Image (spheres, rainbow, N blue to C red):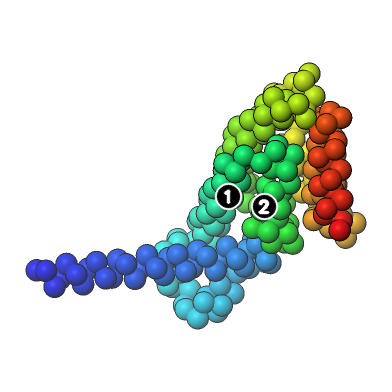
C-alpha cells in the first residue's frame, strides 16, 4: 500500500511539473510572438512533446491563454507590491514599477493587450477588471503619500486622477491610436509616465522628476 501511495504521488508530481513547464513556455511564446500567432503545434514542437500532452492539462488554447494571463497578472502584481513595500519616494516608485512591468512583458513587443482584447475579449475583460482594482489601490496610495511628502499637488482629486492614469496606461496600447512603427512601446511608456507625473507634481516634485529623467538619459 505504501509503495502504491508513493507511486501515485510521483505521478501527480510529474504531471504538475509538466503543467508548469507548458504554462511557462506558452507564456514566454505568447508574450514574444502574440496570442494569435502561436499555435498549439508551435508550442508542442518547442517543448518537444505531443499536442495530446498539452491537451491533457489544458482542454484548448483558450484555457491555456487564460491560465497564462492569470500567471502573468499574478507575477506582475506581486512584483508591484514588492516595489511598493520598498517605500521609495512616490515618483521613483512609479518609474520602478514601469521598468519592472516592461521587462516582465518583454517590452510588449507582441502587443499582448491589443491581441488579447481583439481575439480573446472575455479573458481581456476579466484581466482588465482585476488590473483596474489593483491599480486603483496602488495609485491612490502612491498619490496620498506624494501629497503627504509635499511633492504632489495638494488639490488632487484622487478618484479622478487614478482613473485617468488607468485609462491612459491602457489606451496607449491601442495600436489604432499608437501604431508600433510610430510609437515604440518603451518610448510610449516613458512619455506617458512623464505626462502623468508632471500633471500631479508640484515644484518639489519636479526636482525629483527632472533628476530621474537626467539619470535615465545618462
Q: Residue 130's spot in the image, x, y percent?
A: 57, 39
Give yes or no for contact between labels 1 and 2 (Cβ–Cβ under 8 Å).
yes
Q: In which quarter of the image is the N terminus?
A: bottom left
Residue 154 sits above or below residue 77 on the image: above
Residue 125 shows in the view: no
What secondary structure is marked by label 2? helix
Q: Looking at the picture, tell me which residue is in the foreground, 205 or 137.
A: 205
- Where is residue 150, by image quadrant? top right
**Residue at image coords 64%, 58%:** 104
How many marks on residues? 2
Q: Name the residue under label 1.
A: 79
Q: Mark 2 points at which residue?
A: 101
**Residue at image coords 56%, 72%:** 43
Q: Residue 83's spot in the image, x, y percent?
A: 61, 46
Q: Looking at the picture, tell me which residue is in the foreground, 5 or 54.
A: 5
- Where is residue 15, by image quadrant? bottom left
Q: Residue 49's spot in the image, x, y percent?
A: 47, 78
- Badge 2, how many Cα within 10 Å: few under 14, some, many 20+? some
Amino acid at each position: 500500500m505504501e509503495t502504491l501511495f508513493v507511486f501515485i504521488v510521483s505521478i501527480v508530481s510529474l504531471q504538475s511539473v509538466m503543467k508548469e513547464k507548458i504554462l511557462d513556455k506558452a507564456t514566454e511564446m505568447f508574450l514574444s510572438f502574440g496570442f494569435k500567432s502561436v499555435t498549439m503545434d508551435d508550442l508542442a514542437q518547442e517543448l518537444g512533446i505531443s499536442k495530446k500532452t498539452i491537451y491533457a492539462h489544458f482542454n484548448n488554447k483558450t484555457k491555456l491563454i487564460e491560465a497564462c494571463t492569470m500567471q502573468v497578472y499574478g507575477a506582475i502584481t506581486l512584483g508591484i507590491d514588492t516595489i511598493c513595500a520598498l517605500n521609495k519616494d512616490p515618483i521613483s516608485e512609479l518609474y520602478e514599477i514601469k521598468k519592472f512591468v516592461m521587462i516582465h512583458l518583454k517590452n510588449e513587443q507582441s502587443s499582448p493587450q491589443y491581441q488579447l482584447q481583439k481575439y480573446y475579449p472575455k479573458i481581456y475583460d476579466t484581466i482588465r477588471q482585476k488590473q483596474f482594482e489593483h491599480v486603483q489601490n496602488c495609485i491612490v496610495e502612491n498619490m496620498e503619500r506624494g501629497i503627504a511628502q509635499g511633492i504632489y499637488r495638494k488639490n488632487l482629486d484622487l478618484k479622478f486622477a487614478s482613473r485617468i492614469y488607468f485609462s491612459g496606461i491602457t489606451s496607449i496600447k491601442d495600436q489604432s491610436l499608437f501604431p508600433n512603427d510610430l510609437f515604440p512601446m518603451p518610448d510610449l511608456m516613458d512619455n506617458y509616465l512623464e505626462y502623468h507625473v508632471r500633471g500631479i507634481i508640484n515644484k518639489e516634485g519636479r526636482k525629483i522628476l527632472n533628476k530621474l529623467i537626467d539619470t535615465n538619459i545618462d
